[in-house]
């Protein structure tokens, strides 16, 4: 069972490291990926402006909601925006920095 888990982990890297490869290379030939601190910095640079824009645009409306509803509304927009728009654009824009 452990060999199956290890093989799956090598084949399908976690997080945004998978975006740095085509997925067609064998696991042994795939690059290691950027350091975690670079990925964390890139995530913060993406999340900060999205959250700031959301609070600036929808802040008065969000203030009327209970905390759980505010959190749900914020994350319902933030997560898809980060996954499908912001992070792909940032990883393309900072590709050379991430690969250093």
Image (cartoon, rainbow, N blue to C red):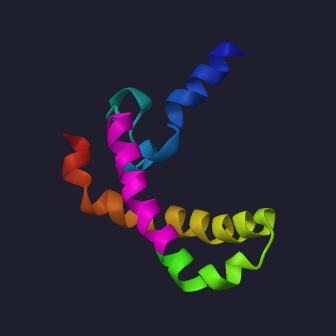
Nearer to us in this view, 37 or 14: 37
The percent coordinates of residue 9 (x first, y second) are 56, 29
- Seen at 77% across and 64% down, the residue is 67
Is residue 24 something one can see in this rendering? Answer: no
Residue 40 falls in image quadrant: top left
The percent coordinates of residue 8 (x first, y second) are 60, 30
- Tell me if residue 93 is in the magenta stretch: no
Q: Is residue 15 shown left or right of residue 69?
A: left
- Seen at 54% across and 76% down, the residue is 54
- Seen at 26% across and 63% down, the residue is 93
Residue 87 falls in image quadrant: bottom left
In the displayed structure, would residue 88 be above or below residue 37? below
Quadrant, the C terminus: top left
The percent coordinates of residue 63 (x first, y second) are 70, 76
Is residue 9 something one can see in this rendering? Answer: yes
The percent coordinates of residue 4 (x first, y second) are 66, 21
- Seen at 60% across and 63% down, the residue is 79
In the displayed structure, would residue 89 be above or below residue 55? above
In the displayed structure, would residue 81 be above or below residue 96? below
Q: Is residue 71 shown left or right of residue 26?
A: right
Q: Is residue 60 shown left or right of residue 25?
A: right
Looking at the image, how many numbered discs can be counted on the residues?
Answer: 0
In the displayed structure, would residue 94 be above or below residue 23? below
Residue range corresponding to the magenta coloring: 33-52
- Tell me if residue 40 is in the magenta stretch: yes
Quadrant, the N terminus: top right
| SS majority, magenta | helix
Nearer to us in this view, 89 or 55: 55
Nearer to us in this view, 13 or 22: 13
């Amino acid at each position: 069972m452990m060999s199956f888990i290890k093989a799956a982990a090598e084949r399908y890297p976690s997080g945004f490291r998978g975006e740095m490869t085509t997925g067609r290379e064998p696991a042994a030939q795939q690059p290691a990926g950027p350091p975690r601190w670079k990925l964390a910095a890139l995530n913060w640079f993406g999340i900060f402006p999205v959250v700031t824009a959301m609070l600036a645009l929808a802040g008065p409306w969000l203030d009327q909601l209970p905390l759980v509803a505010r959190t749900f509304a914020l994350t319902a927009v933030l997560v898809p925006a980060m996954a499908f728009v912001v992070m792909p654009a940032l990883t393309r824009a900072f590709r050379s920095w991430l690969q250093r």
